[in-house]
Image (cartoon, rainbow, N blue to C red):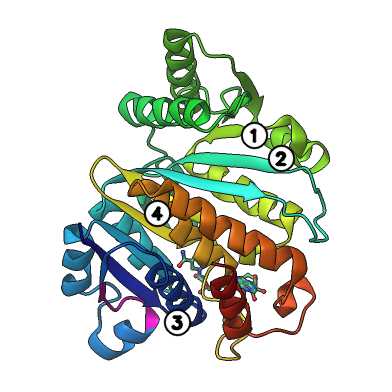
Amino acid sequence: MTHEIAVIPGDGIGQEVTPAAVEVLEALDVDFDFVEGDAGDAVKAETGEALPQATRKMAADADATLFGAAGETAADVILPLREVVGSFANVRPAVSYPGLDAVQPDTDIVFVRENTEGVYSGIEDEITEGVRTLTRVVTEEASRDIAEFGFDYAKQNGFDDVTIAHKANVMRETDGLFLETAEAVAEERGADYDTALMDALAMHLVMHPEDYGVVICPNLAGDMLSDLAAGLVGGLGLLPSANVGEENALFEPVHGSAPDIAGQGVANPSAMILSAAMLLDHLGYDDEGDRVRAAVEGVLDEGPRTPDLGGDASTDEVTSAVLDRL
Ligand code: NAI
Ligand code: MG
């Protein structure tokens, strides 16, 4: 069976790490058909559109999409792309790998982030000069979808601890609905869980990440807490993510286009390659996904490493080392 994969490298280091992930997928005994699309700052400068219709269609028609990163146009690219694939869940594992000088070496957390609403509803207004508002949308349906996904994910992946992040003491209506819906899902399943106020949770994550497994979050909280966890395990170069829908999915590193290092050939390809491993899991190739993760883990442990991890290797050298281990 051939799987059609839309590949959208985007801008900056997206152009450097995306080919690395494709090389890794090509090295496996799985039949992929890759189609490449443009998106981001560069194509916008050329055509006026950050996400051309052809790329949109490519992602809609593919079995899955690999996306690198966009620059200034990130919101104009990734938000519509997440919609195109119908993804309601953003899954962001933060794992500390052996051999790396992680701030917190016992971190193994998966953030399950609501991916469609909250403060990223896009409903903003200038009501009068100097006063602007944002409408935070929370629906029972999206809250239920993300909670069900999170509890299922925890069960399937052997996590005992599930935490529901919220700020319902202040955002009583919106996060109140998020929290009560997620708690109802837990009750229905007879699942154990904790709840945590998201600000206090940020502190606990820094001090005791080992206490957490799956963390179910509203949209903005998931964005911020997962970046925080990236810092605990060694930086943004390590964090993959999946945007999962009912029928389709998109895989991307958590990082952006990293203009400060773009063009130098030194971006860490691990986050992107680990995103490809999540794509393999999603398509049912769990063994291949595990093999890719083991190869990346081996390279992180023994080197070569890119400068963000204290090494002096290039993107290509790290990618070759991963391929050798495969
Ligand atoms: P960023 O993730 O691009 O970079 C933050 C820092 O982490 C930089 O110092 C960068 O060099 C480093 N870094 C990130 N990925 C790395 C990797 N693979 N290897 C080594 N070092 C890495 O975030 P920043 O600086 O906030 O944003 C830069 C641009 O990226 C902006 O234009 C922003 O809009 C865009 N962006 C796009 C995203 C997306 O396409 N999904 C997500 C986040 C930001
Ligand atoms: Mg982010």
Q: Does the magenta stretch include residue 42?
A: no
Q: Residue 247 occupies which quadrant of the picture?
A: top left
Task: Please give the residue where the numbered disc 4 appears in the rendered image.
Answer: 280
Does 228 appear above or below 108?
below
Q: Does the residue labelled 4 lie within 8 Å of ligand 1?
A: no
Q: Measuring 34% from the left and 67% from the top, which residue is drawn there?
A: 77
The secondary element bearing badge 2 is classed as helix
Circles 4, 2 touching at the beta carbon (< 8 Å): no
Q: Which of marks 4 and 2 is nearer the N terminus?
A: 2
- CA distance for labels 4 and 2: 31 Å
Task: Please give the residue where the numbered disc 1 appears in the rendered image.
Answer: 198
Q: Which of marks 1 and 3 is in front?
A: 3
Question: Is 324 left, or right, of 53 in this rendering?
Answer: right
Q: Which of marks 1 and 4 is in front?
A: 4
Q: Nearer the viewer, mark 4 or mark 3?
A: 4
Q: Earlier in the sequence, mark 3 or mark 2?
A: 3
For badge 4, the amino acid type reads Leu
For badge 3, the amino acid type reads Gln
Circles 2, 1 touching at the beta carbon (< 8 Å): yes
For badge 1, the amino acid type reads Met
Question: Is 2 left, or right, of 201 in this rendering?
Answer: left
Image location (x, y in percent) of residue 237 = 62, 67
The secondary element bearing badge 4 is classed as helix
Circles 4, 3 touching at the beta carbon (< 8 Å): no
Q: Which of marks 4 and 3 is nearer the N terminus?
A: 3
Question: Is 313 left, or right, of 174 in this rendering?
Answer: right
Q: Earlier in the sequence, mark 1 or mark 4?
A: 1
Residue closest to the eye, 163 or 48: 163
For label 3, the crowd category at 10 Å Cα-Cα, with few meaning under 14, some 14 to 19 and many 20 or more, is many
Image location (x, y in percent) of residue 167 = 59, 29
User: What is the span of residues highlighted in magenta in the rendered image?
Assistant: 34-41
